[in-house]
Amino acid sequence: MDAAIKAQVEAGTMLPLMEEFYTIQGEGYHTGKAAYFIRIGGCDVGCHWCDVKESWNADLHPPTAIEQVVENAAHYSNTVVITGGEPLTWNMRPITEALKAKGLQVHIETSGAYPLTGKWDWICLSPKKTKPPVAEVYEQAHELKVIVFNNHDFKWAEEHAAKVSPDCKLYLQPEWSKREQMLPKISEYVMANPQWQISLQTHKYIGIP
Ligand SMILES: C[S@@+](CC[C@H](N)C(=O)[O-])C[C@H]1O[C@@H](n2cnc3c(N)ncnc32)[C@H](O)[C@@H]1O
Ligand SMILES: Nc1nc2[nH]cc(C(=O)O)c2c(=O)[nH]1
Ligand code: SF4
Ligand SMILES: [Mg+2]
C-alpha cells in the first residue's frame, strides 16, 4: 500500500470500507430504528459462526476517505451504526468526530477486543471467547449483547453481565444457525431472569440487509 494511504489509515482519516447501507437496525435495544450502516473491514477475533467472514481481511476492502462516507450517512439518516469487521481495529476518533459534527447519533457494534477510540452515543458490546473485551469497555457499554451458541453461553453471559454498569441493557441473541435449538432455552432463561431480554436478528427474518 502507498505510504501516504497507509499513514491515513493509521490515523483513521481513511478506513477500509467494506460496505455502507441504509437499513433498519435489526438487533438489540435500537431494533426497528432506521440507521445508516458503515461496515469497516478487518477483524482478527475469529468467531467460527461469524456471519460476515468476508469482512475479516482488511486488504480486500479499499481504504476510503471518511469525508465521503460521513457525507453519505448524513444524506440518509440521523443515526449511524459503525460495524465491521471489528471497528476498534482502527482509530475511530476522526470518523466519529466528523459524524458528531454533522449532528448525527453515532452507534458502534463491537466485540470490545481492542481499546475504545472515538466518541459514541451508543455502545453495543458483544463479547467473544476468542478475544475477550478490554477491561475499560465494560463500564462504557450501553448494551451487552451475548450470542448464545450453546448451553454454556448462559453462564458465560452472566460473567460478562457482572462487569457492565448497572444501567447497561442485557440481551441474549441466538447464534443464527442454532436459533431453533436455542430460542426455547433463551425464552425460558429470560422468564426466569427478567433482567435479560431476547434480541433477534430481525433483519434476517424480514430479508433486508
Ligand atoms: C458481525 S459483528 C461486527 C461487529 C463486531 N465485530 C462484533 O462482533 O460485535 C455484528 C454483530 O453480529 C453478531 N453476530 C455475528 N455473527 C452472528 C451469528 N451467526 N448469529 C448471531 N449474531 C451474530 C455479533 O456478535 C455482533 O453483535
Ligand atoms: N439490519 C441490520 N442490523 C444489524 N445490527 C447489527 C448488524 C451488524 O452486522 O453489525 C446488523 C446488520 O448487518 N444489519
Ligand atoms: S468479532 Fe465480530 S466481525 Fe469479528 S469474527 Fe466475531 S462476529 Fe465476526
Ligand atoms: Mg450483521
Image (cartoon, grey):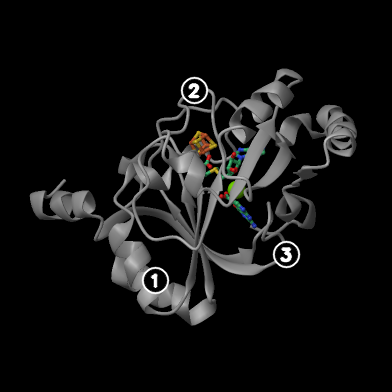
Secondary structure under the numbered disc 2 in the rendered image? loop
Secondary structure under the numbered disc 1 in the rendered image? helix
Where is residue 132? Give x, y as percent.
Answer: 47, 27
- Residue 43, located in which quarter of the rendered image? top left
Where is residue 46? Give x, y as percent.
Answer: 48, 27
User: Dot 1 corresponds to which residue?
Assistant: 99
As drawn, the residue found furthest toward the front would be: 166
Q: Name the kind of residue labelled 3 in the image.
A: Gly
Residue at horizontal 41 percent and vertical 48 percent from the top = 87
Quick check: can you spot residue 78?
A: yes
Q: Name the kind of residue labelled 1 in the image.
A: Leu
- Residue 64, located in which quarter of the rendered image? bottom left
- For the residues bearing labels 3 and 1, Cβ distance under 8 angstroms: no
| Real-space CA distance between mark 2 and mark 1, rounded to the nearest whole angstrom | 31 Å
Q: How crowded is mark 2: few (under 14 residues within 10 Å), some or many (20 or more)?
A: few
Residue closest to the eye, 134 or 162:
162
Vertical side of 106 occupied by 151: above or below: above
Q: Quadrant of the N terminus?
A: top left
Q: Name the kind of residue labelled 2 in the image.
A: Thr
| Real-space CA distance between mark 3 and mark 1, rounded to the nearest whole angstrom | 21 Å
Horizontal side, residue 95 vs residue 83: left or right: left
Nearest to N terminus: mark 2 or mark 3: 3
Nearest to N terminus: mark 3 or mark 1: 3
| Real-space CA distance between mark 2 and mark 3, rounded to the nearest whole angstrom | 30 Å
- For the residues bearing labels 2 and 3, Cβ distance under 8 angstroms: no
Label 2 beta carbon less than 8 Å to ligand 3: yes
User: Dot 3 corresponds to which residue?
Assistant: 32
Vertical side of 162 occupied by 74: above or below: below
Q: Which mark is residue 130?
A: 2
